Amino acid sequence: MRISRRALLASAAGAILPRSIGAADTADRSRMIVHSPQPEDIEMPLDGFTEWITPVDRFFVRTHTYMPTVKLSEWSLKIDGKVDRAMTITMDDLKRLPRVELVAVLECAGNGRSFYQPRVAGTQWAFGSVGNGRWAGARLRDVLQKAGVQDSAKEILFDGADVPLGKMPDFQRSITRAKALHPDTLLAYEMNGGPLPMEHGFPLRVIAPGWASDSWVKWLQHIEVLDREFDGFWMKSAYRHPTQPVAPGTAVDPAAMVPVTNLNVKSVIASPNDWAKPGIVRVQGAEWSNASPVNKVEVSTDAGKTWRPAKLGGPKTQYGWRLWQLDWRAMQGQYTLMARTTNEAGQTQPLEQAWNPSGYLWNVAQPRTITISNQAPVSDGPAGGPPEQPPAAYKTACFGCHDEHMMEQQRLSRARWDAELNKMIRWGAPLKDEDRESVLNYLSGRFK
Ligand SMILES: Nc1nc2c(c(=O)[nH]1)N[C@H]1C(S)=C(S)[C@@H](COP(=O)(O)O)O[C@H]1N2
Ligand SMILES: [Mo]
């Protein structure tokens, strides 16, 4: 593919950051929070939680590497592995299968990562690496049945057309046989009534409703049926979380953790954000869950001492989110607002967040401080003095694949920066041993 040569060049030379790889995308960045322009990680701001279906130009984007350019005329889907008939199918073949449409929440496992203490490395999402989409496509089950899944099948492995940077492992993800054969697991070619936009996986992506979106592989071009657990990096090292409580800040052996699957029950307050005028204040937001629909949200304006049910809106669907609102008579003062959701299975948001090493599945009923006054409070400007001069080695070693957005958003201890340097060197960052100390000093001094 065209991109691989450029990616190689970028990692070898540590040179210019390619600006426009892939097709133009439809997200309106001026209304989004940009964590990294390339690879592209952009977040929906809080007001997005007032719309039932998240429009494409407001939908968050998460990419581990540069977005590929996929031309439908050159695209096909290969299905092989433990099947009776390995095959390659086209979009026309897919569209001849029954078309299924459903509304489902797409949420990154790392949504809310920036709130974890101690901080962990990764995209520093606040609330908005989540959206509610309307997806349509063929059932994965129907495609797999065409190929004939053998009895030994255990996992289904997905690979997209995106090409890794440097020596970074290719983004490949597997799901269980049971999830793959579930009638709601789709291969979607449509989003919100139009063709799947490029940045959301054109021409085809996996829809694994109720599961975190790291399983919703984009730009899908290869499905392999495996008779074992897939042992690639993005299954065995990344996207794993502990099943037992762990002490905050501790390192946990990936072998002692399980892959992230189901989403947690969760709600977000869209508004008010931090200030409102006295009077009737509309508290509103969205709530969602996994395969068990949400059916209740309670709101507290006194830091959890008392709770009142909010009014639900937005149609009820199995996997989609619902909107909610409560009109609150607010007098001058400082308040702590919370919203707490429960699903039909009786799962409810915790009041304390358990910590995990990669900052996944944040879902605490999060206290939000709000000032009720006639005048907006003056906020403090950004803290910190003028930036230090970075060592020369930093520029050559660290700007071949992405710019400083990646570093800037992190707030890490020296030990965590050290681990991050190891990861980037493994992926191909050209950092010489003798320059390591100065780069580590810079990063841990500046982004702490
Ligand atoms: N091929 C491919 N699929 C992918 C990814 C990726 O980097 N490459 N990122 C995954 C992750 S971690 C998330 S959160 C979602 C983001 O989907 P979106 O960009 O459509 O919002 O896509 C998933 N599918
Ligand atoms: Mo993600």
Image (spheres, rainbow, N blue to C red):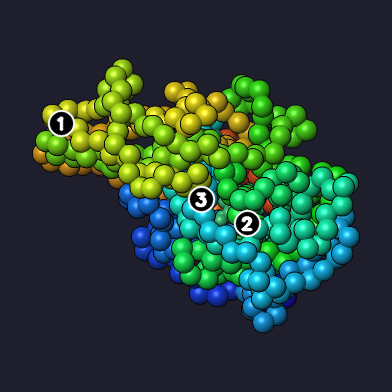
- Give the label, 1 or 2, closer to the camera: 2
Left or right side of 320 for 110: right
Disc ID at residue 186: 2
Query: Which kind of residue does numbered mark 3 sit on?
Result: Ala
Q: Are marks 1 and 2 in contact (CB under 8 Å)?
A: no
Q: Which residue is mark 1?
A: 329
Q: Tag 2, which secondary structure?
A: strand
Query: Which kind of residue does numbered mark 1 sit on?
Result: Arg
Residue drawn at x 73%, y 43% is 178
Dot 1 alpha-carbon crowd within 10 angstroms: few under 14, some 14 to 19, many 20 or more: few
CA separation in Å, label 1 and label 2: 45 Å
Q: Earlier in the sequence, mark 1 or mark 3?
A: 3
Quadrant for residue 416, please give it: top right
Among all residues in the image, which is located at the extreme top?
Answer: 305
Q: Which residue is mark 3?
A: 104
CA separation in Å, label 2 and label 3: 11 Å
Residue drawn at x 30%, y 28% is 309
Query: Which kind of residue does numbered mark 2 sit on?
Result: Leu
Among all residues in the image, which is located at the extreme bottom?
Answer: 73
CA separation in Å, label 1 and label 3: 34 Å
